[in-house]
Amino acid sequence: MDTIKEWYSWIESSLKESLNEIQPVNSPAKASSAEVLAENLIPAIPRRNVSRIALLSQLRSELRQLQKGHYVVLHGMSGCGKSTLAAEALMDDILLEQFKNKIIWLSCGTEAKTGDENEILGLMIDFNERICDEDLVSDVKSVNLNTLKIKLNKKFHKGSFNEALLVLDGVSSEKIIEALNIGCKTLVTTNDENVMSNQGSRYKSIKVNEGFTEEESMTQLALCVGLSVKELPLQARQIHIHGKGLPLIMSLIGAHLEDHQEEVINNPDAWTPYLEALINKDYGNLKRESYGGANFMPKTIELCINNLDPDKQNKYQDLALFVEDVNIKTEVLEILWGLPSFEVRQIMNEFLTKSLVVRKYNAAKNYYVYGIHDLLLYHLKKPLKKKDTLKDLHLKLIARYQEICNGDLAQLPKNDNYIFFYIGYHIANSGDNSLFTKWYFNLDFVEAKLKVTGPADLLSDYKRYGPLFTIGLAQEQSLAVSKQLSDFVRFVESSGIHVRKNHGPDIVQFALQEPHDSEVYKVAVGLVQYRPNNTYLRFQLGPSENRSIPCTIQTKERVSSACFLKNNCDILVGFESGTIQVMNKRGYVTRIYEGHSEKVTRLSVSSVRDIFLSVSESFVKVWHLPDLDSSVHIEPGNRTPSPSQRQQDFTNMFNQKTVEKRMSWITIEVECSNWATFSTNGCYMATCCYGEQLVQVWYMGNKGSLVKKIRAPGTTCVFSNNDNLLIIGCSNSYIHVHNIIDNTAVIQLVDSYPVLALFVLPESGLEMKFGSLTKATLCVWELGNTTAEQHKTNIVRDYNKGEAEYYTSCAAAPDGTVVAVATSSDKILICDLRDGSVIREINYLSGTIGYLAFDGSKDHMLLGCYNDTTIQLWALGDVDCGKPAMMKANFDVAWSNNHMPVLVAPTNKPCVKKISEKTNYEDLQIPESGEINVCSISKCGKYTAISSSNNQVYLHCSINESITKKIFETEKCAKKLKIDISKGKILVVAGFDRSFKVWVCEEKCLSQSEDVKTYTESLNDRLVDIFILSSKELLTVKKNGAIEKRSLNTRETVEVVCKSRLDVAICDTDISCNNDVVTLDSDRKLVNIYFSEGHSVKLAVQPVCCTFSPDGHKLAVGFVNGDIQVWSTVAGSLTDYGRLQVMTKAVKSVCVGNGGLVGGAGEGMLALGYIGSRAGQAKLQVERLVMCPDNTTVLTVDNDGHMHLIDLIGTNESLTSSLSSLSFESEK
């Protein structure tokens, strides 16, 4: 009948009516079900009861099959609705008929709370009186449990009670089961399944889940306030989430809401106090005198706990330590109680059977986790808070953990999935705030916590508990601690993600790269002496004062796509698992969308409608996006973020959603889909299916109807601003512009490579502008009046990509001012879309960016998704407020008499940055506009040659009055630029791809235009480098291996040092102070050195870069495997000096000192060390290293435009003391 009722309710109604009409002849009329229930004292179900269909059906099914002498047992925690479920199940005519209308309900929870013999005797006497109509109270001395049991047994085995059902509600002791084991059919409700331990296989257990489903909770609240489920405010769903759907709580809140029905119907804010009470776990405010369950509940919980032996009661009380919803592994309890795993499991199993805890199996990690319901935690904590003894439990836990790690919290266990996440919570609640400054300013502890929890969790602790750091301190001491806190926060923000990923340097090295007045730096300096086996680098000038520190979000899954929502505050994130989450900029998840089973490759939010789309390989889905600002987000103090977001491998213990989950509105099955986008007005959507070479346009109605089909191998597409046109980028390098109004092709454009991305720019007049990205180009196209007229502008000008470097993705700001371009060399280029210039480079060092997105604010917030679990946000600021002149990494340097550097570096403005001595820096302006791409300084430091993007070469002279003059023009930007002063002549040589140009002038005639010689020479292969040997000779090195000396006077080749070969590919070259030349043949894996004659050494690994030491006596070569090999070049031969591994990836730049100090850089890493010792490593993105004349210090400029002088700690105290921190970025 239950099955028929569920699917064919009208048939069930008719059957029931027919059955009721069938009466035996001469039999009395049947009693109504209400009369039967009342007669047998079965409690009435709540007025606003919500049926739990699945459980109800299961229970009725078991009752129908119940045999005499057997039991059906409902077990679950207090307040989960066991008694209501039992009572509702018996409101069934078929069951009443089966039990011959004889159902005896005994409330054991109120009559026999403890299982005491006298209580049980009283219960049985009442039971006997109800069914036998006997008064035994007057002769109670002659009555005992055994005689009553025999009497009741006989009663239930004959006559009208032969098929009767006995209901034992709220059983707390197995003694009650034994006393009432009278061979009848029995239904038991209990918190403790152990009460049935002696019944063997004679009982069937049904676990009652702790909470309602979301649908059941919503129905309950809707019934109480007289609304439909759809009319309930957003707070209703949040009440279900935070109350975990516990029936008692939902009933209590429903009763409160019903008391104020008119107000809560008309004012959604009236729901908020009840939600706040749940979030803050303030169950006392939910009590309602007219609702008996509120007072009964604490007594029931207390009874369950009191049934434990005293030792276990104390251990259960220890669970008051934990926050709500947290996963507790046995390892935590082993430490807390000092017991082996087996004993802990036994204790927890007893708690489990008494419904005092819950347990779930984590299949992915192969272990059990335990949890305790909020209501039970509230009951445990309340008396301890009153006595102010809860802090003693927290101190106990901290002390136990300190014992197992010998007082060093950096050695806390990393596999318990708990202590590193919640050590701050326990310290805060212990009252011993000195532990914060002891450990949260300890670099070893900070490193350990970062590696376990990530930077977001540590920063959350600093923010939440920071005010406690200074409690009880004097003002001066408080100010010092506040500065420490500020410095550590900034350090974790800038370096926390790198420390966590553990790529090379340890935390001490990262701390040594902090400003020298930072408390973090001072702590690190003090630690160096205790780590004699480690090698550390010292950055003598400190970091740039204007360094950009991104906001980092660490997710639990691998990120595959992301974008900002319209409020510019929240982020939509897609994962490889197919899940989509809404999170704020601190990484707190506020909403989850489920529906994809494959990686989400694309997300896009409509700019005008509250919808967004998502793309996976097989489906394109459209989702409703409710107004997030109207949602109630109140963060409880100890649970922010909640354990579900905080703990690794979290298991949901109560089968309740910790955040709101949504399903898609429209789902379109598109095989091999790779792209989708909304129209500007949000009424249409276009999808690209590369596999089918098909682009489709859909109308966003109720189901998403297909409007247009366009045959094209589209990889990406975008609508024009007026939605009339669809621009399609294709895998065959074509760009199709299609009119979707009349379904006609407008124009077909050709790009250089397959199109990776498209974006539309704000229109001006009748023109349409859009950008296209390929692996080699970023272009802006202008279509005049959508006709065949077109204009193409290359963006990212003056950026010299590496030989194997290519573009991977891009994102344009909605206002059309800037575009961000990710490259394969782990950079993000920020380009001005109005003039094509690169205004900034972001050198991210923690992985490869796979996805970029801009928000719509004036701050130009840029989002980058790494190919792992990391998202970073950069605030670029107002791009119209002026672009600073930032140094590029391809610098040149000369040395003053006191061995101080005189450095010149190109900038992204029409000037060269020049730095000399300690604090002298100036901008060498060129007369015309243009970005500087390369510059060179003479050895004396007085002359600087400058090549700019306007194809001009300039010469700056700093003698007497500084002047800059144009000296010659070129056909393209120079790649190499050299300058030399010899015998009164100034020589400037500009090298290009297959040619070079020479300019020679007498120094005394510089201010005149007389006696100037210029000429250009073509080459038959690509130029690797060019060197000025003297006032009369040049030396060129070409890719084919040819090395030639050329006369400046005759312009002829005077000596062929090495002939060209077809099988040679020279990748790098250098020349020593003795004019010895070295070349690296990457194809044949050879190092060739030319003294008076040539020598070659066969290499086992492919070489990348090379250099000589300042005295020319040592040669260093960097390899693709991260090694550096050093040879001695004394006596005109190569002698192996040793090998040093400096990193795990290719060495892109190398330097070597006269004393054997070796430096290498590449892939965001810089390393220094001596042959035979361990190299020190630091995170730094640089392109060139230069050994200083002292041979212990390395000079470089990082890709953020900051100069560094770096040595090994303890190697050059005199230089350290003579230098101070400088800032070399202009305010221009």
Image (spheres, rainbow, N blue to C red):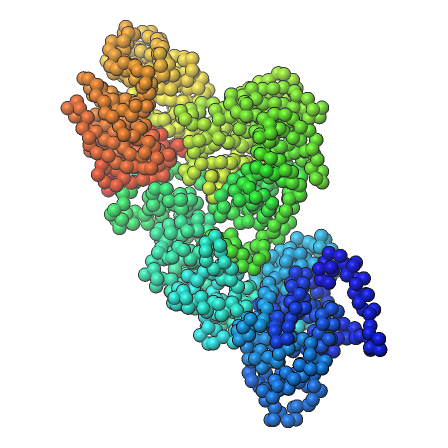
Does residue 1177 show up?
A: yes
Q: Percent position (x, y) of residue 1039? A: 33, 18
> Residue 1188 in the image: x percent, y percent?
26, 31
- Residue 647: percent from the left, percent from the top? 48, 54
Looking at this view, name the residue that lies furthest to the front.
Answer: 25
Q: Residue 247 or 427: which is nearer the viewer?
A: 247
Which residue is rendered at x = 69% and y = 89% of the image?
A: 134
Q: Residue at x 40, y 46 (%)?
A: 500
Report the residue at 38% width, 19% height from top: 975
Q: Is residue 35 placed above or below 911 in the rendered structure? A: below
Q: Quadrant of residue 670?
A: top right
Q: How many marks?
A: 0
Residue 961: give x, y in percent of width and height. 34, 20
| Residue 543 versus residue 160 in the image, above or below | above
Taking the image as shown, residue 127 lies to the left or right of residue 547, namely right
Image quadrant where one finds the C terminus: top left
Look at the picture and state if 923 lies above or below 56. Answer: above
Residue lying farthest right? 26
- Answer with the quarter of the image where residue 218 lies: bottom right
Which corner quadrant holds the N terminus? bottom right
Residue farthest toward the top in the current orientation of the protein = 1050
Comparing 719 with 441, the one in front is: 719
Residue beneath the point at 32% across and 18% down: 1063
Residue 154, above or below 1045: below
Q: Is residue 41 visible?
A: no
Q: Does residue 331 appear left or right of residue 693 in this picture? A: left
Say which of 156 and 873 sits in front: 156
